[in-house]
């Protein structure tokens, strides 16, 4: 099989070339993102391999189907950028990588939190300049603090374990709470009112879009630290900025940003940033932004490549895959139904 691989970064190639060779799949690597204009690059390919910022709306999917592509292999967990209904309508089969290293993302969330509350980002810059002053560097203990975890799936659960290791009190909200778990579930309102730290680990859906907005920010404790390693649009960035300016929000740790598509993963140093909200957020002393890198560990990259090649091989050889995403009667099915 041949796949057009969009939005290629140097760190993608090694693992995909290795597993591709093992499973007889040839990847054609393109730096460009998948859009309506670049879809043509998938001509003579069995499918495309796409990432979080590639466009997979109805227009692009129809174009891919016209080119006789059969598969959309997402090399990520989230699939909010794919119009699954349109994919089903034009006969394209979509697979994703639901888990590759929940540890990578949960550990990054904790790294951001520790960096923020212990001012590591400031200390690093100060000491490089031989500035050994501690003024303005006072942090706070995580031990004994309440952390509210929104979404207790694979990543949320690992993050909970890490927080417990720090002696934090963990409360959680999930639309579908885990059964038979020792997690203390509360309502979203209660979580927001009681948490010193709020960490988001739920998917982006119509229901969760702008979960953190001007109204919900008002429900939070003054000085709350917000961590988002999930999807940018879970937070209304304008409201976040207002909350920070009003000193209601003590700090924000962001690995994702609502309008990240045009900026993240690219070296834009030397350019004028056109997004005033992002520029303002980055300029705040209590905001840490990383460029959607929570997934980026060697273990995760290897797992992503291996699962992706196994996904498409399973569809091709057995006409079924546990990681297939199917839109059926308004619902999303996970895994090819047995009868098909
Ligand atoms: P998961 O599917 O294992 O867990 C998601 C949890 O959110 C589930 O327990 C689900 O019941 C819950 N949920 C669904 N709707 C909800 C709602 N309306 N309110 C509250 N909870 C709700 O997913 P996983 O693997 O833990 O990933 C979580 C998210 O992390 C993904 O959706 C993805 O957007 C993001 N992610 C970010 C990465 C990064 O590099 N920054 C890498 C991988 C994932």
Image: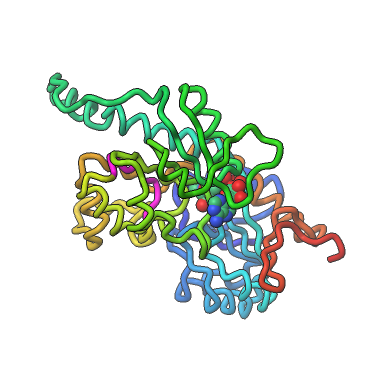
Residue occupying the far right of the picture: 339
Q: Where residue 213 sits: x, y (%)?
A: 36, 57
Q: Is residue 71 above or below residue 112?
A: below
Q: Is residue 73 above or below residue 297?
A: below
Count every numbered label the image shows and give the total: 0
Residue 32: in magenta span: no
Q: Quadrant of the C terminus?
A: bottom right
Q: In the shown orientation, is residue 97 left or right of residue 41? A: right
In terms of depth relative to the viewer, which is nearer, 294 or 248? 248
Q: Where residue 112 sits: x, y (%)?
A: 37, 35
Q: Where residue 255 sits: x, y (%)?
A: 39, 46
Q: Residue at x 53, y 61 (%)?
A: 205
Q: Quadrant of the N terminus?
A: bottom right
In terms of depth relative to the viewer, which is nearer, 27 or 264? 264
Q: Is residue 128 above or below residue 108?
A: above
Q: Is residue 301 visible?
A: no
Q: Where residue 232 sits: x, y (%)?
A: 41, 55
In terms of depth relative to the viewer, which is nearer, 3 or 211? 211
Q: Residue at x 79, y 59 (%)?
A: 320
Q: Is residue 38 visible?
A: yes
Q: In the shown orientation, is residue 32 left or right of residue 61? A: left
Q: How is the image coloured?
A: rainbow
Q: In the shown orientation, is residue 176 left or right of residue 143? A: right
* Predominant SS along the magenta part: strand
Q: In the shown orientation, is residue 95 left or right of residue 290? A: right
Residue 250: in magenta span: yes
Q: Which residues are magenta?
A: 249-257
Q: Is residue 133 above or below residue 98?
A: above
Residue occupying the far top of the picture: 132
């Amino acid at each position: 099989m041949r796949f057009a691989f969009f939005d290629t970064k140097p760190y993608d190639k090694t693992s995909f070339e290795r597993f591709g060779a093992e499973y007889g799949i040839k990847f054609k690597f393109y730096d460009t993102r998948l859009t309506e204009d670049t879809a043509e690059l998938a001509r003579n390919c069995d499918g495309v391999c796409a990432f979080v910022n590639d466009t997979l709306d109805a227009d692009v999917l129809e174009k891919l189907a016209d080119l006789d592509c059969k598969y959309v292999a997402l090399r990520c967990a989230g699939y909010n950028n794919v119009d699954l209904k349109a994919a089903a309508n034009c006969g394209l089969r979509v697979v994703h990588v639901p888990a590759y290293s929940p540890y990578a993302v949960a550990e990054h969330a904790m790294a951001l939190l520790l960096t923020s509350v212990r001012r590591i980002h400031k200390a690093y810059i100060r000491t490089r300049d031989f500035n050994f002053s501690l003024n303005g560097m006072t942090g706070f203990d995580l031990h004994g603090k309440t952390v509210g975890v929104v979404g207790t799936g694979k990543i949320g659960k690992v993050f909970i374990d890490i927080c417990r290791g720090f002696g934090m009190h963990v409360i959680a909200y999930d639309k579908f709470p885990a059964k038979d778990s020792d997690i203390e579930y509360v309502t979203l309102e209660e979580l927001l009112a009681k948490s010193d730290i709020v960490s988001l680990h739920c998917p982006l859906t119509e229901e969760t879009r702008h979960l953190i907005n001007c109204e919900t920010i008002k429900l939070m404790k003054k000085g709350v630290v917000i961590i988002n390693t999930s999807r940018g649009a879970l937070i209304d960035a304008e409201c976040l900025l207002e909350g920070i300016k009003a000193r209601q929000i003590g700090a924000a740790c962001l690995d994702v940003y609502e309008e990240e598509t045009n900026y993240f993963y690219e070296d834009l140093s030397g350019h004028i940033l056109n997004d005033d909200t992002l520029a303002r957020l980055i300029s705040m002393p209590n905001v840490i932004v990383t460029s959607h890198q929570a997934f980026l560990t060697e273990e995760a990259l290897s797992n992503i490549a291996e699962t992706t090649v196994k996904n498409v091989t399973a569809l091709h050889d057995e006409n079924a895959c546990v990681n297939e995403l199917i839109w059926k009667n308004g619902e999303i099915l996970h895994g090819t139904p047995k009868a098909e």
